[in-house]
Image: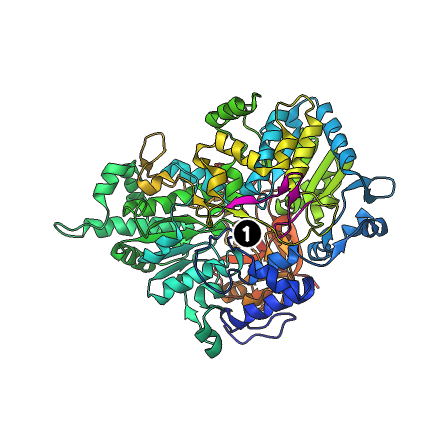
Amino acid sequence: MSEQRNVRGIKRYDSPAGGWGALGATAKAVREQMETIEAPITLFRTNKPDGFDCPGCAWPDKEHTSTFQFCENGAKAVTWEATKKRVLPEFFAAHTVSSLLERTDFELENEGRLTHPMAYDRASDTYKPIGWDAAFARIGEVLRALPDPNMAEFYTSGRASNEAAFLYQLFAREYGTNNFPDCSNMCHEATSVGLPQSIGIGKGTVSLDDFDQCEMIIAMGHNPGTNHPRMMGTLHEVARRGVPIIVFNPLRERALERFADPQNAMEMVTFGSTPIASSYYQVKVGGDAAALKGIMKALIALDANAGPGSTVLDHDFIATHTHGYEAFAEDLRATPWPNIEAVSGLPKAALEAVAQAYAKSNATIVTYGMGITQHSTGTSNVHQIANLLLMRGNIGKLGAGICPLRGHSNVQGDRTVGITEKPSADMLTRIERVFGFKPPEAHGHDAVRAMQAIIDGRSKVLVCLGGNLVVALPDAEQCFPAMHTLDLTVHIGTKLNRTHLLVGRESILFPCLGRTEQDVQSEGPQSITVEDSMSMVHASRGKLPPASEHLRSEVSIIGGMAHATLPQSKVDWLGMVADYDRIRDGIEAVFPDFADFNARIRTPGGFRLSLPPTERVWPTSSGKAEFIAFQGVIEDPQTGGADVLKLTTLRSHDQYNTTIYGLDDRYRGVFGRRDVIFMSEEDLAAQSLEHGDLVDVETALPSDSPRRLVGYTVIAYKIASGSVGAYYPEANVLLPLDYFDKACGTPSYKSIPVRISRRAV
C-alpha cells in the first residue's frame, strides 16, 4: 500500500491472528463483563463433556487434552452472556422506549442481562413488569383471536437448543401455521436448498477426522478468525503438516494469512506464527461462480489432454454415482474465458493453476461461508462447489467432502428438529401419529416473506425465539415502521436489542436462561442438546446460577405459551417442561435418526447423525448426485455500469452476527469506529478519492427512493478491484428487501451494487 495520511481510528495491525492479541482481548472481555474469580472457571467449562456448549460458532470439538477449548470470540460470547451487568425494571422505568432507540446496538446490549418479564405500556412509552402467567394468558388471548393462524409469525434464532426448537415448532404447528422465519433464511439457506438438489442432504459431509487426512483445502468466502474462530486450530494443524490451503476471498483477511495458536507454547514464546493460505486469490465480490466455472473448465481440458490411460476426472465415480454430467460439461465448454475472467476478476492462468493443484490431490475438502451463500446466485454457487467435488469423486471419501461453515452454535440443529417453513409430508405424518393433531401442510413464510407480510398487514403477531430479526433483515426504512403496526410482538432473549424496542400495539419481553446457566425444572436439573456444523449432537449443561431468580428457560417459556394458547391441546406441554428427556423422546419418535437419543447424549462427545452421502448414498429424486449447471448469465444484469462497484457486508472482529461486543476490528486495523468503507487503491484512484475522504454510498439498483449511507470514511484496503466492503448490519440500509436469491430467499447481503461519491462539504 502507498503512503497514507493519518485517519482517526485507522492504524496498521501487523501481528498474526490469534497469539498475544487474542489473549489480551480475552482478558479485556473478562475484565469488563465478569467477576474475575468466576470467569476462569466458567471459561474452562466451555465445550467440555460435563460443561456447556459455547454460545458462539458451530465448529465442532475434537476430544483431546488441550488446556482449554475456547477461543477469543468464544470467550467474548461467554463473558457477554455471563456478564455481571443487569437490566432491572428500574432501568426501564427511567428510560422510554423512544429514548432507548437513540442508543447504538452496542450500547443496548452492553447494559447487561434482562431480569424480569416486561410488557410495553403505551401511555408511558416504557416497559413495565408483568407476571409470567398474566403474560402467557395475554399471548394466548391474542393468538386465539386472530382470524387465521397464518397471521402469526414464529421466528427462531440459531442459539435455541434442540429441545426448545422442537417444542416451538410443535406449538406453532398445533396452533395452525408453518410460518417459521428463521436465521438460516438469512445465512445458509442456499446450503439448505442447494445441497439437497446436488447430493440429497442440506448438510456438510466432512468430520474433523477428514481434516487430518485431507491433501488439500479450498476455502471460499469466509473469515474464520472472526466468524468461526475455533476452526483456526484445525487450519493451523493442517497448514503445519504442509497441506495446501487455497483461499478465494475478496479481502485479505489476517486469519487466512497467518495465525499464532495460543495453545502452541513455542509460537507464543517466540512471537512466531504459521502461514495459513498457500495461495490467496482475491476474487471479485459476486465472482465466485465464475471462478469455480473457470477451475472446472480447466479440469475438463486437463482431462482431455491427459494422454492414453491417464485421467484427471474420476470417470468411474461420475458414471456410477452421478447424473447430468454431459449437460453440465457442455455448459462449461461453452462459457468463454473472457467472461470468466471479467466476472471473477482472476486471470485464466490463476484458475488453471488451481485446477492443476486440485488434480494432484487425492482428497480435497472445500469449506465455504456466507461469502458464497448471501448472493442473488447463492444457491447456484453452492451447486458449483458440489460440482467441483463430484468431478473427482471427493464426496464419500476419507479426507474429502463439502464443509459449509454454519454460524450460530445450533442453527443446524434447529432445522434438523423441525424449524422449517417447508415441512416434508413424512415429518408431518409422524407428528400427527406421535402427538395426535394434524399439522398444516401449506408452506409458510421464510424471513423475507414474513416481513413482507408484516409490511402488507397480512401478519399481525410476531413471536421471536431469540435473535434481533428486524436489524438482521435488509431495508430498515420499510421494516422498522412496519413493526409498529403489529397487534403483538413477543421476544425471548437474554439481552436488550433494537428489535425489542420496535414495539407493536402490545409487546412482551421475556428474559431467558443463557447457555452458561443452571436449568432446574420441577423434576430436577436439565441439560439441553445442540448439533454442530458436522452433525455431531451432544449435551450442554450450564453451571452458573441464573442472572435473576425470575428467569425461565426457553423450553419453559415456550411450554407456558403453548399451554395458555391451546387449552384443548393433546400435547403434555408442562410435563415436557418438567423433564427434557420427554422432549427428546418426542424428537426420537418424529425423527428416526435420533434413535436412543437420551442414552446417546449421556455419552461424552455425543453422537453423529446419519449422512448418507458419506456412504455414497444419494437421497435425490434420481438416486444419484446431480451435476447442476450454472443457470443463465454469470453476473446479474441489474448490477452493471462502469461506475458501479459491488459492496459486501462484513462482520468486525468485535462482533457476532448482530451482536456488537465493541467498536474495534483489530485484524483490519480499525479501532473505535464502524463508519468506514473498505476500497482498493485502484478503485480509489479511479474515483479520484483518497484514503480518509468522506463519501456517500448509494445503491445502484432500480428504486422508488434512494438508499444511502451518508458521511462514511473511505479506507484503502487490500480488497479486490471493483469490490468494496462495509459493516453489517449498518450497511443493510443499502439492500432492498426484494433483492434476494429467488431459489432460497436469502437476501444478497454480500453483493450489493453501489455507487460511491465524494461527500459534499
Q: Residue at x 67, y 21 (%)?
A: 568
Rendering coords of residue 584 (x, y %) = 53, 36
Q: Residue at x 80, y 39 (%)?
A: 130
Residue 713 in the figure: left or right of residue 302: right
* Vertical position of residue 379 compared to residue 65: above or below: above
Which residue is at the front of the view, 344 or 405? 405
- The part of the chain drawn in magenta is 512-531
Q: Is residue 435 magenta?
A: no
Residue 737 in the figure: left or right of residue 304: right
Furthest-right residue in this view: 123
Which residue is at the front of the view, 52 or 239? 52
Disc 1 is placed on an element classified as loop
Residue 473 in the figure: left or right of residue 264: right
Please tell me how crowded label 1 is: few (under 14), some (14-19), or many (20+) other residues with Cα within 10 Å. many
Figure quadrant of residue 503: top right
Q: Main secondary structure of the magenta part?
A: loop
Query: Number of labelled discs?
Result: 1
Rendering coords of residue 638 (x, y %) = 51, 43
Figure quadrant of residue 452: top right
Task: Name the colouring of the figure.
Answer: rainbow
According to the picture, the residue beneath numbered tag 1 turns out to be 53
Rendering coords of residue 479 (x, y %) = 67, 41
Q: Looking at the image, can residue 278 be seen?
A: no
Residue 577 in the figure: left or right of residue 364: right
Q: Is residue 523 magenta?
A: yes
Query: Which kind of residue does numbered mark 1 sit on?
Result: Asp
Rendering coords of residue 376 (x, y %) = 49, 43
Figure quadrant of residue 106: bottom right
